[in-house]
Amino acid sequence: MPMELRSGYVRASGYANKIRKVLFAITRGRAEPEEVVRAAAELNQYLFGKFQELGVRKEDVVRISIGFSIDGGKIIWDYDSLKIEVYRREEEKNLAQAMEEVEEREKALDEAIKELENLAERLRALSDEISEKVEKLKQEHSGLKLQVER
Amino acid sequence: MPMELRSGYVRASGYANKIRKVLFAITRGRAEPEEVVRAAAELNQYLFGKFQELGVRKEDVVRISIGFSIDGGKIIWDYDSLKIEVYRREEEKNLAQAMEEVEEREKALDEAIKELENLAERLRALSDEISEKVEKLKQEHSGLKLQVER
Amino acid sequence: MPMELRSGYVRASGYANKIRKVLFAITRGRAEPEEVVRAAAELNQYLFGKFQELGVRKEDVVRISIGFSIDGGKIIWDYDSLKIEVYRREEEKNLAQAMEEVEEREKALDEAIKELENLAERLRALSDEISEKVEKLKQEHSGLKLQVER
Amino acid sequence: MPMELRSGYVRASGYANKIRKVLFAITRGRAEPEEVVRAAAELNQYLFGKFQELGVRKEDVVRISIGFSIDGGKIIWDYDSLKIEVYRREEEKNLAQAMEEVEEREKALDEAIKELENLAERLRALSDEISEKVEKLKQEHSGLKLQVER
């Protein structure tokens, strides 16, 4: 089944992250995270070369679309269908500035998610500790079936 | 290093649990749970035969001691050192009744620990769910390093 | 509705804890924890005086029963119904030693429960922290209804 | 101390959320959430009237800046300093479309945060349940100090 990835408008400096985020969102449940990461990296590397050819600077805004298919869990890019639009900062001043703001906001969001991730990791460690303590309580103070007996 | 397990006074009906609990407590950190379970089961089976020979009834009280060693992580019983004391209910009425009460209290404790174990399992499942949700948030809404990239 | 508290056999040194534990268990759902604590303390103080009169030593074993009623959430002891049995260590050697062992085991259980309580407290603090972080994420990065708007 | 709120470019349909999010971010630690919500609502209502006068449609892009001060915990808008820029869709096609995309992404983020909030609420309920169970264990099976005794 042919699919299409559309990056939407994005500051050139952040195209790689945007490609990956969009690819995760549109392939959810159809491809393993490892494959999404790999495929995004492959495309991003290709785009990097193209952007150099086109003289794209990080403050320009780009918009990318490309077709792909998923075959046996693998994401295959149809490079012939690749479309790249470039909006130069000097010609699209408001757009460029708006996309710069979006990038700033995303950095703040990254920070907040990072903090939440740390809390989630502490929660996992603590819930493991609680399980172990309950298991020890069972071993030394109960006649209940133990984990090793299951 | 020679060690000794002393069951203390216990109602005959509950000797197997008591042996296991005491063995867990005194070997903590020196033997794997699987080995403690195995060794307790081995001794308990041996005791079961002995109790039948001695005509021990579940309402009698017993007290067991036996030497053992831990060699390469394995618990080895020194059956020659086994001592079994039996206190018949009719001769030690107060002791027998007291041990019956202890058994009742332990059943109530088992119930409470069982409930706690269920809560601990729900906690682990929930903390896994939270981690997965945060990971999905990272995949689709952040530029942060993902778990598959570590 | 008249009820009865029976301590069962207990080492004299631990009668107060036993009275309280049993009172909690048999009044569960019918009296507030504060009232159980108060009523247990009242009875225990009374028993303390009685034990002194009787010359009970901590290594003896006692058994107490007393009637009570719950009226308007309040626990009222029927002191006329109080029965105290005392088993002197020298006369009931096995019983006394068995109850001493029970006391030892209970101390180990107390330790284990204490550790679990610390983990439960850390869990509450951590889950509060996670809620606050999610709320901050909502405030600064979402259009979702906030807690202060509920 | 005079401060300034700058909305940045935002689709007119989403100005109210943007004002609130930015106000939360820049007043963090200096104003209570209730006051931030109140002040954002006050400004948003004023802006709503202004947008109607200016014939702003939801698909246009706006940019707002306004000075304010915080006095005794209260946020006071300096309406004289209010600046509103309006970018009509037909004149700024790329900008308008980019901001529409941003709005779409924010809705997806809202969904993800909402799910996380539900998990955080379940975690709080579960950790309360665990604390209660541990407290009950203490009441009926330990001599430990109870919560009501603290």
Image: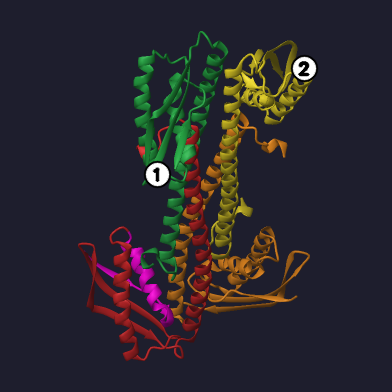
Chain colours: A green, B red, C orange, D yellow
Q: Which residue does the numbered mark 2 point to in the structure image? A: D50
- Magenta segment includes B24: yes
Label 1 Cα crowd, 10 Å radius (few <14 / some 14-19 / many 20+): some
* Disc 2 + disc 1, Cβ < 8 Å: no
Q: Which of C46 and B109 is in front in this view?
A: B109
Q: Where is residue D18 in the image (x, y as percent from the top left)?
A: 64, 25
The answer to whether residue A119 is seen in the rendering is: no
In the depicted structure, whether residue D71 falls above or below residue B17: above
Q: In this view, does D98 lie to the left or right of B39?
A: right
- Magenta segment includes C73: no
Q: Which residue does the numbered mark 1 point to in the structure image? A: A32
In the depicted structure, whether residue A18 falls above or below residue D141: above
The answer for which chain carries disc 1 is: A
| Cα separation between marks 2 and 1 | 49 Å
The answer for which chain carries disc 2 is: D
**Which marked residue is nearer to the observer: mark 2 or mark 1?**
1
In the depicted structure, whether residue D2 falls above or below residue D33: above
How many numbered discs, if any? 2
Q: Which stretch did the figure color magenta?
A: B1-28
The answer to whether residue A54 is seen in the rendering is: yes
Q: Report the residue that reaches farthest toward the top.
A: A90
